[in-house]
Image: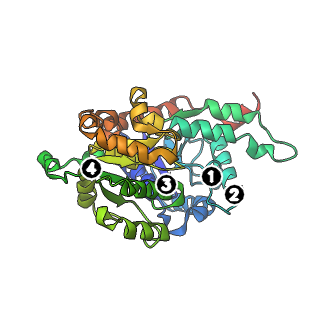
Amino acid sequence: MHILWLDAFHGGSHAAVSQGFARHSQHAVTLLTLSPAGGWRWRMRGAAITFAREVHRRSLPPVDLIVATDMLDVATFLGLTRDQLVNVPVALYMHENQLTYPLPPGRTRDLAFPWINYTSALAADAIFFNSAFHRDSFFAALPDLPGRYHDHQERDLLDALAARARVLPPGIDLARLDMPDASERLSVHQTPTLLWNSRWEYDKGPETFFAALRELKRRAIDFRVIVLGEHINPRHPTFLAARDELERYVLAWGYAPDLETYRRLLHQADIVVSTAIQEFFGIAVVEAIYCGCVPLLPDRLSYPELIPSHLHPTCLYRDDDHLADRLCEMIAMLPDLKRIDFRAIVVGYDWSCMAARYDAAFADVVTTRGYGDFAAKTHR
């Protein structure tokens, strides 16, 4: 097949998945992308127009399938390209959504963006979510979106949307994290090393993580910490204060400048911790587990899907207030925990395994075309 992949917010996990699929798929993939420089709000509003102009400028070979990610207004794009992309099926891939994404304190949700997610889903033949948690939370909240209006809510369409939703985890280039020399991990610091490799924003709960570290310090627990992750403001007051207070425990702090540094630091850590209040999948955690870290994750969001149920009591915590207690327990148990093959839990997310799943899922969208046709849905 020839797949046209439209990535309106080409950064972070969005870019990694689109580029990874293009490299590993058996199909021919044309990527149209826009970098995140303009901000996600402008991408959701304007990318459809830009992509439509690009389609008209190019001499594309016949397209068998369009794959669009959640930052694109799919309905507008299809309307603007109806002369070029006639009757081409569409798959919508949802990395995130603007209906259930938690907002920072004091901010009111602009319903224009959830509405774009909704109409994009209506226009698509299949909707792929990166986790079951993401799918279920989206459809649980969706009825309230049209439900807030006084008439013509068209709620009967929602069941048809849910029936077309599937779970397809992101493929990850985990092989790039393999150390050239496997023995290098033997030379790491002997003191237990905690890793936090999340984006430096409110939705990843940094205050909870730093509060737990302060409690470990108060209890005179010996540890080291590596704090990584993408940050818009490297001088965020929460992080500046934490670094000053925890300075003697810090092995690394800030955005890793290159793959070699990132890989080395992941392999140097012993326990990866998440304190997120929003996570639709958890690529960074999967990468750390692949590199040998024992996970300690909140028992919420997408994390229970990442960890086998028999390891939930060990690796998931229910109460943020007791995170420090759980860290103390895990540090004490670390020699035994390191004998568990956590890497085997996540290795299946590597593109060497996932590419075939993506190819089959997208081929199925083309084969079953017509099931998601909007006109057909409205007459059911």
SS label for mark 4: loop
Residue 4 in picture, x, y percent from top left: 47, 48
- Mark 3, mark 1: which one is toward the viewer? 3
| 316 up-or-down from 20: above or below | above
Name the front one of labels 4 and 2. Answer: 4
Foreground: disc 1 or disc 2 = 2
Figure quadrant of the N terminus: top left
Q: CA distance from mark 3 to mark 1?
A: 24 Å
User: Which of the two discs, 3 and 1, labels the residue nearer the N terminus?
Assistant: 1
- Colour scheme of the rendered structure: rainbow
Q: Is residue 192 visible?
A: yes
Marks 3 and 2, Cα distance to the nearest angstrom? 24 Å
Picture coordinates of residue 244, whole percent (x, y)? 38, 70
Q: Nearer the viewer, residue 278 or 68?
A: 278
Foreground tag (1 vs 4): 4
Residue at the image position 58 percent from the left and 54 percent from the top: 72
* Residue tagged 1: 98
Label 4 sits on residue: 192
Mark with earlier residue (4, 2): 2
| Mark 1 secondary-structure assignment | loop
Secondary structure of the residue carrying numbered label 3? helix
Q: How far apart in space, not on screen, are marks 4 and 2 (Cα)? A: 41 Å
Q: Are marks 1 and 2 in contact (CB under 8 Å)?
A: yes
Residue 379 position, x and y percent, is: 77, 30
User: To which residue does mark 2 refer?
Assistant: 109
Question: Viewer-proximal residue, 250 or 253?
Answer: 250
Circle 2: element type: loop
Q: What label sits on residue 208 in the rendered view?
A: 3
Q: Is residue 118 left or right of residue 215?
A: right
Earlier residue among tags 1 and 4 = 1
Q: Residue at x 29, y 33 (%)?
A: 344
Q: Nearer the viewer, residue 147 or 242?
A: 242
